[in-house]
Amino acid sequence: MLELGEYEREDFSGERFDGDYTGVKCTGCRFDAADLSDGHFHACRFSDCTFGAAKLGGTRFSDCAFLNCKFRFAELFATDFITCKMTGSSFLDAQITCLTIDGGDWSYTELRGIDFARMRLENIDFEGADFGPASFRKAVVRDCNLTNANLSCADFSGADLRGTALSGTDILSMNLKGAKVDLEGCVVIASALGAQYTP
């Protein structure tokens, strides 16, 4: 059972957390195979924690921080991350469906294999994140920071990228057919093609 307070190197593997939790701080803790389904977490902080094969169906995290955490093989269905700080966390091999990300800092995260098609992503910092050849087909990616993100061979066909920073990405490898971009995006694309914007 998690109560308000700080936990260090505790093993919560296999336990169930389906209540409301506020202000909990965990460092180096294990939540492997834990069941967090339908739990509500607010203003909690997890540093260097593992959530291997954990169940997070219907879980809601608001104003939480996950720093260098690992979610390998975790099951995330209809999971909400509301203005969370996820810096350095990895979702490699996680099973993700109907994910909601509302704002927050997702810089330098490992997000390979996640399908972002038709998702709405706004006001999110993804600087340096590793997406690999992810699909953002017909997604709304507005006012986000994708600077220096790994988006090699990513599919943005039909996506709305207005207000999103794309500098430092591999523009030439992306599928941008039918994507909506603003003037700044046009300049970045033109530069990648060797052209120079002149007003």
Image: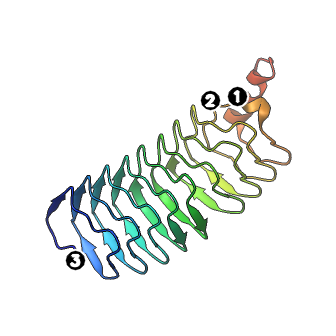
Earlier sequence position, callout 3 versus callout 1? 3
Q: Which mark's residue is nearer the viewer, 2 or 3?
A: 3
Q: Position of residue 146 (x, y in %)?
A: 58, 39
Q: Position of residue 135 (x, y in %)?
A: 73, 52
For the point 34% across and 65% down, the residue is 31
Do callouts 2 and 1 mark residues in contact (Cβ within 8 Å)? yes
Earlier sequence position, callout 2 versus callout 3? 3
Which residue is the site of mark 2? 167
Q: Position of residue 38 (x, y in %)?
A: 42, 81
Which residue is the site of mark 3? 1
Which residue is the site of mark 1? 188
Question: In this figure, which colouring scheme has been used for the structure?
Answer: rainbow
- Amino acid carrying label 2: it is Ser
Residue projecting furthest to the right: 177
Quick check: can you spot residue 199?
A: no
For the point 66% across and 57% down, the residue is 116
Q: For the residue labelled by badge 1, is the local secondary structure a helix, a strand or a loop?
A: helix
Residue 43 lies, with reference to residue 67, above or below; the image says below
- Amino acid carrying label 3: it is Met
22 and 138: which is toward the camera: 22
For the point 69% across and 49% down, the residue is 134
124 and 89: which is toward the camera: 89
